[in-house]
Image: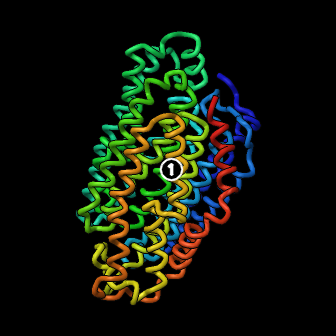
């Protein structure tokens, strides 16, 4: 047995901080009961913000610890900051909803903190075992959060579906890991890369089958076709703050895990797994575009939208270049901003004390609440990829990487899917500004929602003026991932 010194523990200081703080939060919640929900929520936000500061101030160069199972690098810093930001905003957006719906229980923010801890471990995984432990820590918390609105049949059904299908995906992932271990003799990412470079095992049928199962398990976590079946039902059935959370931080962490798991150990087998990624990317973009055309529920529409956006992000991974990985990271950052802003708007859709979720409920919003309509219109234009909004640049970088990698069929499929998907985003704008007014939403908007919507809208609109910092940070992060 090896003894861990303080120098071994320091690279994982943000994770250790979140783990210890979550236990303290649990004690506070236990002693104060549901009366302490607000306190626990704000403390949880503080914990995540401090964790982000620790991540940014920690080591940026590649540092490996815990017997080679945990890695800290510029790529991990980028992805962790996005995941921590998404989780913090999800807790902030949940405050008013939980209070209004009689769901103010202290366990909710703690579960999000624990899920975020799992995300951080996933992002820093350098071994199949640590990958699986982080993934399951995140998933177990998410299963509970999805069914948190326990008086709702739809939420309970959503949580059960998520749990059953999540267990299936975990089984597929473990089977893939076992095949990879059987044909290479290792689960460590560095040793796997060395084995594939020094032998011809990269071309063995057994390893390829293992990779197929591994990719299938990871594809479930990012809602890529054909492992997307849980997404629309869970998004629609879960409480809206939960849907906002599921659409942001877990997707970013899972996509970061996808990149690290395929690029770091399996770059020698690039020709094998590239084919799989190209197929699921095209299928995700197509289904995300066409399946949402007839959706009238905003949460369900956003579910199909997220499937399509994960397809666009996978284009950069399929390219397998530094430019492609940079495009994925830029896309994830912009995706986080757009989704958080959109769900902030959805969470303010209350009529006579009741939440509404229909597209037609937005009718006449341009007259009844012009500022909210303007911000939401900016976000819809951005999600559609219309210049000069930020979403256009996210798609531009992954499309450019695909073209440079000569993946012309995938690039054309992406452009056509974007054109089709633009219909349902523009339809929302048409309903807000040109349809006969529906009943107005409750006024005024909560302060935190107004701030989130304003900042996300402003960032989306003004990103074109100064994109350099994000692009430079993403380029450094992508360079750290490639061997």
Residue occupying the point 41% across, 78% down: 348
Q: Please state the horizontal and vertical placement of residue 169, each as a whole percent of the image.
A: 34, 38
Q: Please state the horizontal and vertical placement of residue 114, each as a whole percent of the image.
A: 51, 52
Asked if 266 appears above or below 319 in the picture, the reply is above
The answer, for residue 294, to whether it is visible in the render is: yes
Residue occupying the point 28% across, 73% down: 358
Q: Secondary structure at mark 1?
A: helix
Residue occupying the point 68% across, 40% down: 73
Task: Answer few, some or many: residues within 10 Å of disc 1's Cα (few below 14, many 20 plus, some between 14 and 19).
Answer: many
Question: For this rendering, which residue is in front, 290 or 257?
Answer: 290
In this view, the residue farthest toward the top is 199
Question: For this rendering, which residue is in front, 141 or 412?
Answer: 412
Q: Which residue is mark 1?
A: 252
The answer, for residue 140, to whether it is visible in the render is: no
Instruction: State left or right for residue 339 relative to residue 175.
Output: right
Q: Please state the horizontal and vertical placement of residue 344, each as a whole percent of the image.
A: 46, 72
Quarter of the figure that contains the C terminus? top right
State how many labels appear. Answer: 1
């Amino acid at each position: 047995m090896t003894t861990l010194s303080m120098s071994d523990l320091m690279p994982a200081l943000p994770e250790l901080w979140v783990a210890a703080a979550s236990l303290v939060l649990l004690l506070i919640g236990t002693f104060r009961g549901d009366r302490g929900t607000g306190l626990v929520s704000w403390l949880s936000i503080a914990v995540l913000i401090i964790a982000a500061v620790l991540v940014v101030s920690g080591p940026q160069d590649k540092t490996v610890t815990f017997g080679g199972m945990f890695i800290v690098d510029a790529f991990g810093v980028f992805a962790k900051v996005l995941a921590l930001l998404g989780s913090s905003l999800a807790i902030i957006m949940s405050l008013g909803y939980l209070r209004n719906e009689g769901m103010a229980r202290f366990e909710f923010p703690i579960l999000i903190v624990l899920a975020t801890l799992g995300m951080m471990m996933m992002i820093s995984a350098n071994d199949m075992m640590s990958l699986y432990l982080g993934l399951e820590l995140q998933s177990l918390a998410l299963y509970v959060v999805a069914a948190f609105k326990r008086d709702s049949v739809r939420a309970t059904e959503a949580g059960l579906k998520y749990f059953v299908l999540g267990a299936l995906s975990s089984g597929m992932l473990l089977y893939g890991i076992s095949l990879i271990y059987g044909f290479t003799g290792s689960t460590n990412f560095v040793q796997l890369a060395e084995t594939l470079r020094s032998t011809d095992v990269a071309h063995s049928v057994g390893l390829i089958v293992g990779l197929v199962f591994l990719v299938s398990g990871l594809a479930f976590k990012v809602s890529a076709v054909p492992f997307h079946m849980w997404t629309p039902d869970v998004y629609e059935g879960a409480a809206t703050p939960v849907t906002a959370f599921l659409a942001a931080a877990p997707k970013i962490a899972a996509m970061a895990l996808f990149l690290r798991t395929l690029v770091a150990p399996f770059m020698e087998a690039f020709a094998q797994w590239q084919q799989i990624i190209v197929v699921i990317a095209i299928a995700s973009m197509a289904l995300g575009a066409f399946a949402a055309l007839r959706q009238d529920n905003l949460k369900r529409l956003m579910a199909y939208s997220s499937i399509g956006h994960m397809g666009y992000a996978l284009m950069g991974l399929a390219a397998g270049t530094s430019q492609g990985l940079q495009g994925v990271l830029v896309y994830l950052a912009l995706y986080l901003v757009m989704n958080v802003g959109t769900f902030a708007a959805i969470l303010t859709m209350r009529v006579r004390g009741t939440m509404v979720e229909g597209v037609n409920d937005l009718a006449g919003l341009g007259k009844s609440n012009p500022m909210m309509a303007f911000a939401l219109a900016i976000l819809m234009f951005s999600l559609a990829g219309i210049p000069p909004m930020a979403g256009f640049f996210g798609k531009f970088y992954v499309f450019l990487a695909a073209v440079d990698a000569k993946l012309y069929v995938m690039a054309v499929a992406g452009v056509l899917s974007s054109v089709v998907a633009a219909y349902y985003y523009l339809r929302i704008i048409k309903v807000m500004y040109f349809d006969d007014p529906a009943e107005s939403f409750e006024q005024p908007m909560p302060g935190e929602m107004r701030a989130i919507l304003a900042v996300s809208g402003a960032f989306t609109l003004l990103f074109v003026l100064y994109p350099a910092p994000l692009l430079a940070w993403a380029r450094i992060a992508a360079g750290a991932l490639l061997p």
